[in-house]
Image (cartoon, rainbow, N blue to C red):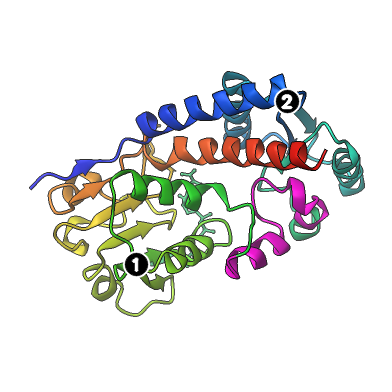
Amino acid sequence: MTARIIDGNALSAKLRGELAAKAAELTAKGTQPCLAVILVGGDPASAVYVRNKVAGCEKAGIRSLKFEYAQDTAPADVLGKIAELNADPSVHGILVQLPLPKHFDEKAVLEAISVEKDVDGFHAENVGRLSQGQEAFIPCTPNGVMEMLKSIETPLRGAEAVVIGRSNIVGKPMAMLLTAAGATVTVCHSGTRDLNFHTRRADILVAAIGKPKFVTGDMVRPGAVVIDVGINRLPDGKLCGDVDFESAKDVAGAITPVPGGVGPMTITMLLANTVESASRAARKA
Ligand code: NAD
């Protein structure tokens, strides 16, 4: 059996078209959605992510503002900019690209962003709201995964879902969203004793580990939906996921590729959160 490929580029293009239409509608009524992005330091991967986010905004008719700071910038300068953007009614989303340099208190920076503009969904209040099923900004990567599962009509209620990874930005919110959708969720991590035991009984297997080709075909239940969140660079410069695509595609029922899977969906959901924030602001105005 060869798995159905869940094409993140195609799904993103469709959703971004819908978002561009919503952004144009809001703009026509006087509220152009606007995302402010803050980048500190010269990490090349972060610079690429920020460039892609800004380009995504432009294509969707979302205004973007980019603020770049040197590696040795004082945290107070960045916190000052966040305060300024919080108070600016023309800005609907604020994103601080992670990771920050070591001398920053990352948590304090994320908490400084207004909950109403926290389009990454990393603020503790948004995380709390999400866990209680209240209106919240949902972190973009797991939200993108939910859209991908929806696009192929994956049954979620009662499904066995296994998430490998328990990070704040992927694993934990992923588990919350799958739980809310009615799946029975197991979260595996570096301390899990028998990982294969868990992965082999998953109807839905989400890999967010950060280790190239870690999940091999023998770890996958036949017919499972396999979602590969990982983005790893191999020594030859090529990108690969946390799943060994070649062996897993022969066992899975559906699978996401890397690149062209979850990656483009993450930015799409960031744009969606920004447009949503702008429409909430327009409703209040
Ligand atoms: P992280 O390093 O914060 O977390 C990795 C998780 O993997 C940890 O919870 C750890 O317990 C678990 N883990 C490590 N070794 C393990 C093992 N041997 N067995 C089981 N679990 C193990 O990483 P993250 O930020 O969650 O990112 C994970 C991957 O997803 C990375 O490759 C990252 O680049 C990628 N990522 C992609 C997107 C996207 O847009 N597609 C967004 C965010 C992260």
In the image, residue 114 lies at what x, y percent? 80, 51
Left or right placement of residue 249 versus residue 47 in this view: left
Disc number for residue 32 = 2
- Residue depicted at 73% across the width and 25% down the height: 32
Residue 48 in magenta?
no
The residue positioned 22% from the left and 48% from the top of the image is 254
Label of residue 9 in the image: none
- Disc 2, SS: loop
Task: Answer with the quarter of the image where residue 106 lies.
Answer: bottom right
Camera-side residue of 256 and 132: 132
Task: Estimate how packed mark 2 is, as few (under 14), some (14 to 19) or many (20 or more) residues with alpha carbons within 10 Å.
Answer: many
Question: Assess mark 2: CB under 8 A from ligand 1?
Answer: no
- Which residue carries the number 1 mark? 162
Question: How far from the left and from the top, in percent, is residue 175?
Answer: 46, 66
Give whichever of 42, 279 is nearer the camera.
279
Mark 1 to mark 2 CA distance (whole Å):
39 Å
Residue at image coords 63%, 52%:
137
Q: Residues within 10 Å of mark 1 (few under 14, many from 20)?
A: many
Q: What is the magenta range?
A: 110-133
Q: Amino acid at mark 1?
A: Val
Q: Position of residue 204 (x, y in %)?
A: 29, 60
- State whether residue 10 is above or below residue 198: above
Asked whether residue 40 appears in the rendered view, the answer is no
Which residue is farthest bottom? 193
Badge 1 marks a residue whose secondary structure is: strand
The quadrant the C terminus occupies is top right
